Amino acid sequence: MRSISAKELKNKTGEVLRKVGEGERVLIMKRGKPWAVLSPVKAEELRPSGLREYEEAWEDIEKALKTSRPHFKTWKEAIRRTR
């Protein structure tokens, strides 16, 4: 793992981020002490657990809409009732 100072990170942010994008981890030092680690991240790691994929969730919404009846006859009636 490569280490750089916070000042060096400030001056070479683009270069450092390219290296991180290539899979390298970078240790950021502040006043000579380890401060943070920049590392690549996968999209799966960012998704909160328990959430389904968009396509799967939308499929369920469409099924529910096809099997249910609307509460209002028109969209205008729905707006009137909700105001």
Image (cartoon, rainbow, N blue to C red):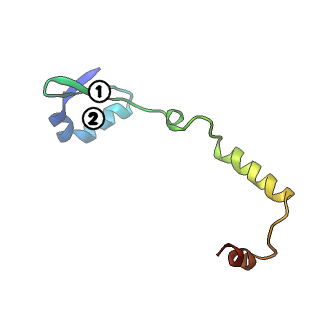
Q: Which residue, given by chain and number where applicable, does mark 1 sit on?
A: 26
Q: Amino acid at mark 1?
A: Val
Judge whether 57 appears above or below 76 on screen. above
Q: Give x and y (percent) for residue 39.
A: 36, 29
> Dot 1 surroundings within 10 Å: few (below 14), some, or many (20 or more)?
many
Q: Quadrant of residue 5?
A: top left
Q: Amino acid at mark 2?
A: Val
Judge whether 8 appears above or below 54 on screen. above
Residue 16 has which mark? 2
Foreground of the two, 83 or 62: 83
Secondary structure type for disc 2: helix
Tag in front: 1 or 2: 1
CB of mark 1 within 8 Å of CB of mark 2? yes
Secondary structure type for disc 1: strand
Q: Quadrant of residue 56?
A: top right
Task: Name which residue lies at 27% across and 35% down.
Answer: 16
Q: Give x and y (percent) for residue 28.
A: 24, 28
Q: Give x and y (percent) for residue 11.
A: 17, 40
Q: Quadrant of the N terminus?
A: top left
Q: Quadrant of the C terminus?
A: bottom right
Task: Name which residue lies at 73% across and 75% down.
Answer: 75
Task: Name which residue lies at 48% across and 33% down.
Answer: 42
Task: Name which residue lies at 65% across and 47% down.
Answer: 54
